[in-house]
Amino acid sequence: MTPYPVNMDVRPAVEAFFDDATNTISYIVKDPTSEACAIIDSVMDIDYAAGRITYDHADALIARITEMGGKLEWIIETHVHADHLSAAPYIQQKLGGKIGVGEKIMVVQETFGKVFNEGTEFQRDGSQFDALFKDGDTYEIGNMQGFAMYTPGHTPACMVHVIGNAAFAGDTLFMPDGGSARADFPGGDAGELYDSIQKVLTLPDDMRLFMCHDYGPNGRDIAWETSVGEEKAHNIHVGGGKTKEEFVKFRTERDAQLAVPKLIIPSLQVNMRAGEVPTDDNGNPMLKVPVNGL
């Protein structure tokens, strides 16, 4: 395994922004010693039935960074989300910063380029993004160093981003009482997901873990922060020493019962383009609906 440059002495300031429509949590991660910051997993609002896109959630992130006098250096996607649309290009236009994602985005682009019958003009080389992270790659946010951990299983391009004593789990893990994400999307694999979670759980027990989604299981209030130690001890899907075989059996049976995410069709088309909405031959924003294609 790649020796990751963990530095628990660095304590970034983390602000969470919950999106009720998609149960997504976006984050502003700020270097406490400078104005530099990053956004992780932004959301673009969509009224899918009306075909209308707006930017209230992204505007809240922009307003907060402007208020704090922040300098946005990175807009990071933990993976190609299937349940919400990224607002990365909109935010970049307003505040700058580089858009980054895992290098396996190319696998996702190849898979869903076929599903959505994209033409040769759709590049499948990740060039829509400013940076493609490999396992163990590092980057700077002011005086802080972040690094990417490759954590496939939910999708082939999933990465957990670790910045000081804070790790952003994407969909690899949920809160302890939420378990883990599904592994039945094209390119997903329950066994890989188990291995990826075990890799995350080798981080220090007091590493802060921030979730990308929370659904308030059993009626509890929405929550998004836990720790590696809490996940190891109490995660209902992998905690307490559950075996890979147990996890794969449970995850496979569970996934077979789950509905398709409501926004998967627009989300995949937009997010594999780094948040850009596809256009028709006349340059008008346009989404496709593949019939029996997913």
Image: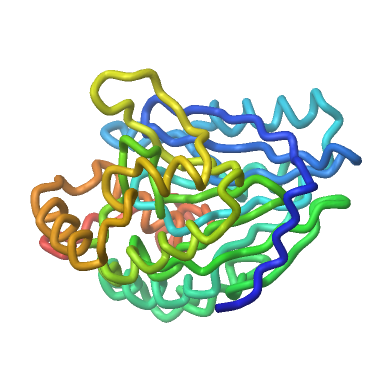
Q: Please indicate whether residue 267 sits to the left or right of residue 54 in the image.
A: left
Q: Please indicate whether residue 29 sits to the left or right of residue 116 in the image.
A: right
Q: Residue at x 42, y 81 (%)?
A: 120
Seen from the viewer's position, the closer of residues 277 and 202 is: 202
Colouring used for the render: rainbow
Seen from the viewer's position, the closer of residues 272 and 161 is: 161
Quarter of the C terminus within the rendering = bottom left
Based on the displayed image, in which of its 4 quarters is residue 71 positioned? top right
Seen from the viewer's position, the closer of residues 281 and 101 is: 101
Quarter of the N terminus within the rendering = bottom right
**x and y percentages locating residue 53 in the rendered image:** 45, 36
Based on the displayed image, in which of its 4 quarters is residue 21 positioned? top left
Q: Residue at x 65, y 51 (%)?
A: 75
Q: Please indicate whether residue 263 sits to the left or right of residue 152 in the image.
A: left
**x and y percentages locating residue 94 in the rendered image:** 73, 40
Q: Could you tell me how many numbered marks the image carries?
A: 0
**x and y percentages locating residue 289 in the rendered image:** 23, 55
Q: Please indicate whether residue 130 sits to the left or right of residue 156 in the image.
A: right
Seen from the viewer's position, the closer of residues 283 and 206 is: 206
**x and y percentages locating residue 48 in the rendered image:** 31, 37
Q: Is residue 15 above or below residue 89?
A: above
Q: Residue at x 60, y 75 (%)?
A: 134
Q: Is residue 230 above or below residue 274?
A: above
Q: Residue at x 30, y 32 (%)?
A: 50
